[in-house]
Amino acid sequence: MLLVKQTIVQNLLLLLKKLVSQLYWIELLHRNKYIDDKQYQSIYNDAEELVKLLVHRCKKIDEQLCEDK
């Protein structure tokens, strides 16, 4: 079970890294006027919410891993 949780955390961290990269590209699209303010805010807010969820989930699993040891 420990290995499964570690794998989940690794996958979540990889996903988080990719999401942060996507935020960068979203900002670039907005700065260069490929997307308007409304589109930018909508996409960016959704992505930020996902970041918060992933961070929270990683912390929860990490706490569980510490308790299991």
Image: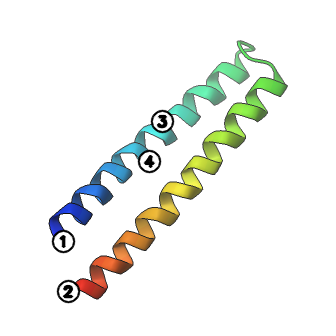
> How far separated are the C-alphas under marks 4 and 1?
21 Å
Q: Can you identify the residue that label 3 sits on?
A: 21
> How far separated are the C-alphas under marks 4 and 3?
9 Å
Q: Earlier in the sequence, mark 1 or mark 3?
A: 1
x, y percent for residue 10: 28, 54
> Does the CB distance between marks 4 and 3 fall below 8 Å?
no
Q: Give the left or right position of residue 62, taking residue 26 as reference.
A: left
Give the class, few, some or many, for how many residues have Cα within 10 Å of label 1's Cα (few <14, many ≥20).
Answer: few
Q: Can you identify the residue that label 4 sits on?
A: 16
Which numbered disc, 1 or 3, marks the residue closer to the eye? 1
Q: Can you identify the residue that label 1 sits on?
A: 2
Q: Can you identify the residue that label 2 sits on?
A: 69
x, y percent for residue 29: 65, 19
Which numbered disc, 2 or 4, marks the residue closer to the eye? 2
**Residue at the spot x=44%, y=47% of the render?**
16
**Residue at the spot x=26%, y=65% of the render?**
5
